[in-house]
Image (cartoon, helix red, strand yellow):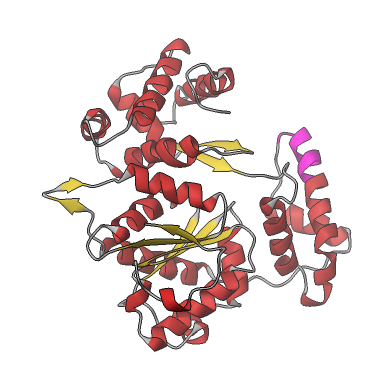
């Protein structure tokens, strides 16, 4: 799916959105809309996700459409996406006024799952989670568990997709799979998410009350991630490196799990103290695999050159584990000349 004006698949999907939005309880209940695709593009990762992020973050339709229409704020690809969405809604017989379009875009999410690709990161992450779902002694059977879950999903779909958690566990037990005990890590994940939001909140991205979106720089980050999982945003002091990081993090946070670290908000002395503060039951590898399990995850490190030695140990531990987790990427900001005398890894991506 390209989401372009002549994309017939997108038109049919918007037709489905128009149909479901006409249900009696759609607007009064918490309904979200998801489009799952197997391959992304620069436009999908950049302008189209920007539109959805703005629709969720901006408080009303008037503000949203003023920003979309403002020269230098949105770009032509963003305006084309909104126009196409509105046109398809109208063609499907649904309301296409500003309020309806804004509300529907605010509920819409685009997810990328590459299960059909060779060397699929999504499949590797699923198998990684299967290892942790099994009894510690049965980790070698993770591939069998993934195959069994795939077969069960197909069978369940034939009956309308109805299966409770208890029924699923009973079915797996009947197939001789021993499952690990429950891990109660939700409070720790919520604390980590809250800390990341606060860290992003510290970063200024407005001048005279106007948000600086820097679409070209954000698009450059997307492009860099296509060729590597470690990206550095470099530049002189005050040029807006952190603002680019903030915009990118907020753009993808609805579809991907993010962790954001800064020099003044990072627990010092490595992973173990951070794990204790979070009250986490598990390893750093397990946490990052879990976060990346929805399709992808990103570890953001702002102002790497200002971390003190003890806080840097925590960054090192997390980056080291992120490198072993499929689908987990790392994006950092630093001054242009930081560590240049010691850099030898040609695989790192630089955005100046």
Residue 166 is situated, as x and y percent measured from the top left of the image, at 72, 56
Overall secondary structure of the magenta section:
helix
Residue 85 is situated, as x and y percent measured from the top left of the image, at 42, 23
Please state, as top left, top right, bottom left or bottom right, where the N terminus lies in the image: top right
In this picture, residue 330 sits left or right of residue 115: left
Magenta region: 152-160
Q: In the rendered structure, does residue 154 fall within the stretch colored magenta?
A: yes
Please state, as top left, top right, bottom left or bottom right, where the C terminus lies in the image: bottom left
**In the rendered image, the vertical position of residue 184 relative to residue 203, given as above or below:** below
In this picture, residue 254 sits left or right of residue 138: left
Can residue 18 be seen in the rendering of this structure?
yes
Please tell me which residue is depicted at 37% across the width and 17% down the height of the picture.
95
Quadrant hosting residue 216: top left
Please tell me which residue is depicted at 60% across the width and 68% down the height of the picture.
323
Residue 185 is situated, as x and y percent measured from the top left of the image, at 54, 71
Quadrant hosting residue 81: top left
In this picture, residue 151 sits left or right of residue 8: right
- How many marks the image carries: the answer is 0
Q: Which is more toward the observer, 93 or 124?
A: 124
Residue 9 is situated, as x and y percent measured from the top left of the image, at 59, 21
The residue positioned farthest toward the front in the image shown: 341
**In the rendered image, the vertical position of residue 232 relative to residue 105, given as above or below:** below
Please tell me which residue is depicted at 72% across the width and 52% down the height of the picture.
123
Q: Which is more toward the observer, 93 or 112?
A: 112
**In the rendered image, the vertical position of residue 59 relative to residue 224, given as above or below:** above
Q: Which is more toward the observer, 199 or 275?
A: 199
Can residue 29 be seen in the rendering of this structure?
no
The residue positioned farthest toward the left in the image shown: 208
**In the rendered image, the vertical position of residue 102 relative to residue 148, given as above or below:** above
Q: In the rendered structure, does residue 92 fall within the stretch colored magenta?
A: no
In this picture, residue 251 sits left or right of residue 4: left
């Amino acid at each position: 799916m390209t989401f372009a004006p002549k994309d017939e698949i997108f038109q049919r999907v918007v037709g489905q959105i128009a149909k479901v939005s006409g249900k009696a309880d759609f607007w009064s209940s918490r309904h979200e809309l998801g489009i799952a695709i197997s391959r992304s593009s620069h436009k999908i990762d950049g302008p189209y996700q920007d539109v959805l992020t703005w629709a969720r973050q901006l408080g009303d339709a008037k503000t949203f459409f003023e920003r979309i229409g403002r020269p230098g704020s949105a770009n032509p690809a963003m305006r084309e996406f909104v126009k196409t969405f509105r046109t398809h809604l109208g063609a499907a017989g649904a309301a296409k006024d500003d309020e309806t379009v804004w509300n529907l875009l605010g509920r819409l999410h685009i997810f990328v799952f590459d299960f059909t690709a060779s060397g699929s990161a999504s499949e590797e992450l699923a198998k990684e989670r299967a290892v942790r779902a099994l009894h510690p002694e049965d980790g070698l059977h993770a591939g069998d568990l993934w195959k069994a879950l795939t077969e069960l999903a197909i069978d369940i779909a034939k009956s309308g997709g109805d299966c409770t958690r208890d029924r699923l566990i009973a079915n797996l037990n009947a197939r001789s799979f021993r499952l690990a005990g429950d891990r109660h890590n939700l409070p720790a994940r919520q604390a980590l998410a809250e800390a990341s939001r606060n860290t992003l909140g510290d970063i200024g991205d407005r001048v005279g009350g106007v948000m600086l979106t820097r679409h070209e720089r954000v698009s450059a980050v997307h492009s860099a991630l296509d060729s590597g999982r470690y990206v550095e945003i470099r530049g002189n002091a005050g040029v807006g490196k952190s603002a680019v990081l903030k915009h990118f993090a907020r753009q993808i946070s609805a579809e991907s799990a993010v962790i954001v670290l800064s020099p003044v908000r990072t627990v010092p002395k490595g992973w173990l103290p951070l794990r204790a503060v979070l009250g986490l039951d598990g390893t750093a590898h397990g946490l990052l695999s879990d976060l990346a399990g929805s399709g992808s995850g990103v570890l953001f490190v702002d102002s790497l050159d200002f971390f003190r030695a003890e806080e840097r140990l925590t960054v090192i531990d997390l980056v080291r584990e992120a490198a072993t987790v499929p689908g987990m990427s790392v994006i950092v900001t630093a001054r242009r000349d930081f560590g240049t005398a010691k850099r030898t890894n040609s695989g790192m991506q630089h955005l100046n």
